[in-house]
Amino acid sequence: MSKKMLFLAAGYVLGWVVSSLYNKKKPEDIKKELKAARKSWENDFSVLANNFVEIHNNLLEDIKSEVLSEKNKKLLKKKTQEVADIVESYKTAWKEVLDELQVRGKEFLTEASEKLEVIYQEKKQEISELTDLSPEQVEEIKKKLTKAYNDVKKKIK
């Protein structure tokens, strides 16, 4: 079987599944609509197209209700707060090290750099342990953390 036939068959099966799950009309009702359309000079295509649109609207509403559920909204808010807390604790810890560096001077430079590295690694690990975030989101947060870390390192040199 060629790839085209395989894709055609897969599309047919997928369409049938979606149609079966999200079509609220019975086949008899669609047949009645088609019969009525022929009597009123409306064509079959418009009836079928309207049914197609209705099926997809039902599908989209279902997806929307799942994605935008109260549970998911609360989870997003919680995870956003967790990331904000990690970032804030990171800023606070770095500020303490930088303030100490200003007070103690150059003899503290190596120790400050090491402390910053430890803080960076700890926060990076905290971010890795965040659950319910996609790997892409975790990597994006880590990139921002790394950029901030590199900016701070440049300041102390």
Image (spheres, grey):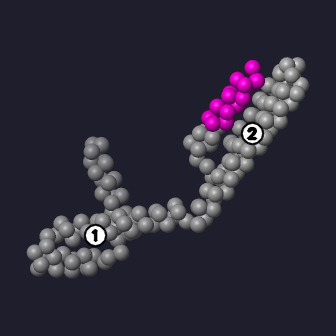
Instruction: Report the predominant secondary structure element of the magenta stretch.
Output: helix
Q: Nearer the viewer, residue 91 or 36?
A: 91
Kind of residue sitting beneath label 2 = Lys
Q: Is residue 41 visible?
A: yes
Residues packed near mark 1 inside 10 Å, few (<14), some (14 to 19) or many (20 plus)? some
Residue shown at 75%/39% (left/top)?
Answer: 91
Residue shown at 26%/79% (left/top)?
Answer: 29
Q: Nearer the viewer, residue 120 or 26?
A: 120
Labels 1, 2: front one: 2
Magenta segment: does it hold 155? Answer: yes
Residue shown at 47%/63% (left/top)?
Answer: 64
Q: Is residue 30 left or right of residue 143?
A: left
Q: Is residue 8 left or right of residue 73?
A: left
Q: Is residue 102 left or right of residue 135?
A: right
Q: Is residue 20 visible?
A: no
Residue 51 image point, x, y percent: 28, 69
Residue 86 image point, x, y percent: 73, 45
- The region drawn magenta spans 143-157
Q: Nearer the viewer, residue 10 or 35?
A: 35
Query: Which mark, residue 148?
Result: none
Residue 143 image point, x, y percent: 62, 35
Query: Which mark, residue 91?
Result: 2
Considering the numbered disc 2 on the image, is that residue within a helix, a strand or a loop?
helix
Marks 1/2: CA–CA distance: 55 Å
First in sequence: mark 1 vs mark 2 = 1
Q: Is residue 80 left or right of residue 13?
A: right
Q: For the N terminus, which image quadrant?
A: top left
Kind of residue sitting beneath label 1 = Asn
Magenta segment: does it hold 130? Answer: no
Query: Which mark, residue 51?
Result: 1
